[in-house]
Amino acid sequence: MSDTKKTPAYKEINWVIIGIWIVLLIIMWPIYWVNAPNLVLFIISLVITIAGPALNYGLLWYKISKKKKKISK
């Protein structure tokens, strides 16, 4: 047996999703600032801003619930 503990699934961060999210933020918000009156760009920027963390936590929830279902069977 190893002395190291495995990190629980809810504490794991999906760095790929976070990286893509940060790149999209860096691209979209300056474009929006230049074209500030454009409502469509604002909505797209807002969706990207909210979607990154939501997707990450959604995937973590999915992993945890999938693991709990395996344990309960």
Image (spheres, helix red, strand yellow):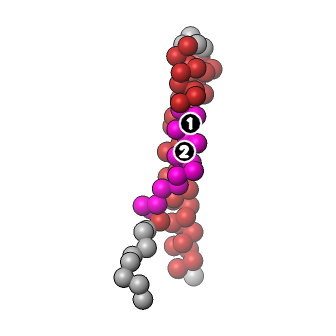
Would you place residue 12 above or below residue 19 in this image? below
Q: What residue sits 58% from the left and 28% below the top?
A: 27
Q: Amino acid at mark 2?
A: Gly
Would you place residue 23 above or below residue 64 in this image? above
Report the span colored magenta: 10-25
Q: Tell me the quarter of the picture where residue 41 sits.
A: top right
Residue furthest bottom as drawn: 1
Would you say residue 33 sits in the magenta stretch? no
Q: What residue sits 52% from the left and 79% below the top?
A: 71
Front residue (pair 71, 27): 27
Asked whether disc 1 touches disc 2, contact meaning CB atoms under 8 Å apart, the reply is yes
Question: Where does the image place residue 54, in percent across and percent down from the top left?
Answer: 51, 46
Residue hosting label 1: 23
Question: Where does the image place residue 65, in percent across and percent down from the top left?
Answer: 53, 66
Decide: few, some or many residues near mark 2? Use Cα within 10 Å; few <14, some 14-19, many ≥20. Answer: few
Would you say residue 18 sits in the magenta stretch? yes
Judged from the image, the secondary structure of the residue bearing numbered disc 1 is helix
Q: Report whether residue 53 is seen.
A: yes
Residue furthest top as drawn: 37
Q: Main secondary structure of the magenta part?
A: helix
Residue hosting label 2: 19
